Each structure stands twice: as structure tokens, then as C-alpha cells.
Image (tube, rainbow, N blue to C red):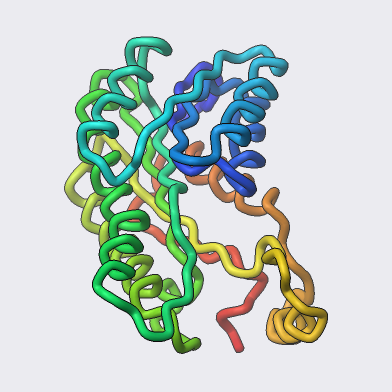
Amino acid sequence: MDPKGKVVILTGGARIGQVVAHALALRGCNLALTYRGSRDAAEASAQAAIREGVRAITIRADATDEDQVVRALEETHRELGRIDILLNMASIYLSTPEPKETDWSNIINANTRSAFLFSIHARPIMKLGASGGRIVNFADWLPASGRPRYKGFVPYYTSKAAVVALTESLALELAPEVLVNAVAPGPILMPPGLSAAENDEVIDATPLRRWGGAEEIAKTVLFLVESDFVTGECIRVDGGRHLY
């Protein structure tokens, strides 16, 4: 798919999402940026995209609420005329050493239910276009590598493993019109508050010996958008972290 002139709806557009949004704007994509709490990040991304000569709108929507998801998709279709690409980036990363049922529900809903809802409701709109569509979900390098390695992340790990399964299932269900893939980030951006010792531990366990940077995620998203023969894949972007 040639991204130029296509319409992207991107959920969870803070931090890495801002870099991905800008990369797509540079390739000529018009953007709909949904947010629940990160309004400033979404507005900044929209303004940056407009400066690149494309159209961009922001939509407040809770990605776990089906009515709000449908409304966001309808607004995108109405304002921008089509939907070609869906990036399900909305996510919660949370350690839960003694998880409660509310932790389970909140994390599963934010990381898995949101991607499911946006995908199933975007499909009919995508199929209206001659070029079909692209859906890119966001998993994690751990479940993409087949096993957990850290304690205290049961709901998170499970939610991201479910994203991988959702990606594969949707790829089969939505073919041939819509291609569905996932990105599984590893050490991309240093988390706030990470100590020097913890940073050294990450670097030592990553064969490429550095944090990747959000640009590497943007490159991978662009590859999956532009490919016409890759579907059902989950690509790790982790600097080889899974090898250790």
C-alpha cells in the first residue's frame, strides 16, 4: 500500500505514538488521533502533521468503550473521507505483584479489548476502499518470544499474549482485503525513573547494546503498512533482547 493520501486512525498517541504519527504524516497520510487522557500529545501531533501539509484531527475516545470506539471511527470517516490504516497503540504497562480482579480487567481491556473493538468496527469502513486496509497492533517482545521472564506482570503479559493471538486470528478472518500484523517493542525508550544500575542491566542484556528509539518502531510500522504480502506476523523490535 502506498501511504500517500491514505487515512490513519491511531490510538494511544503519546511518546512513541507521536513519532509514528509524524513519520506517517511525512509519507503523506492524513491522521485521526484518538486519546483518552493525553490530549496535549494528540494536539501536538496533529499540529505537527498539519505543518507537513496533511489533514489531522483529534478525537477524545475511551478505546475500551464500544460506543466511543464506533463514534471515533464514524467521525474519522465523516471528517477525512475514508479509513485505510488502523494503529492500535493504546496500552497500559503496569506491574501488579499481587493482582486484583480490577487490575486484570483494566489491563486486559486497555491492551486487548481496545484493539479488538477498533479492529472489528474499522473493517467495514476499510473494505469500502479499493486498497483494502492495514491493521497494526502492539504486543510486547516477551509474549512474542514465547514466555514471561519477569514476575509481577501476570495481567500485562497475558494481555499482550492475547494481542498476538488476536493479530493472527484477525489476519485469517479479514484476508484478503485487510492485512493484520503486530509490532512487539523491546527496549525502545528508557522509562522515567530508571536507575543507572537498571539501565546498565538492560544494555548488558541487549545484544545491540542500546535503547532503540521510537524511530525504529516508526520504521517497522511503515514497513507493515507498505507491504502487500505480510499478514499475521508479530515483529519484535528489541535489539536482539529475546536472544538472551
- The picture places residue 187, in percent across and down from the top left corner, at 65, 69
Horizontal relation, residue 17 to residue 182: left or right: right
- The picture places residue 129, in percent across and down from the top left corner, at 30, 19
| Extreme residue in the left direction | 173
Q: Residue at x 29, y 37 (%)?
A: 178
Q: Residue at x 36, y 57 (%)?
A: 111
- Asked whether residue 128 appears in the rendered view, the answer is yes
- Asked whether residue 227 appears in the rendered view, the answer is no
Height in image: 89 above or below 72? Answer: below
Q: Which residue is nearer to you in this view: 78 or 144?
A: 78
Q: Quadrant of residue 234?
A: bottom left
- The picture places residue 76, in percent across and down from the top left corner, at 37, 19
Horizontal relation, residue 231 to residue 4: left or right: left
Horizontal relation, residue 192 to residue 172: left or right: right
Please count the marks in the image.
Answer: 0
Height in image: 20 above or below 57? Answer: below
- The picture places residue 32, in percent across and down from the top left corner, at 47, 25
Q: Residue at x 43, y 62 (%)?
A: 139
Q: Residue at x 72, y 56 (%)?
A: 213
Q: Which residue is nearer to you in this view: 188 or 13?
A: 13
> In what quadrant of the picture does the C terminus appear?
bottom right
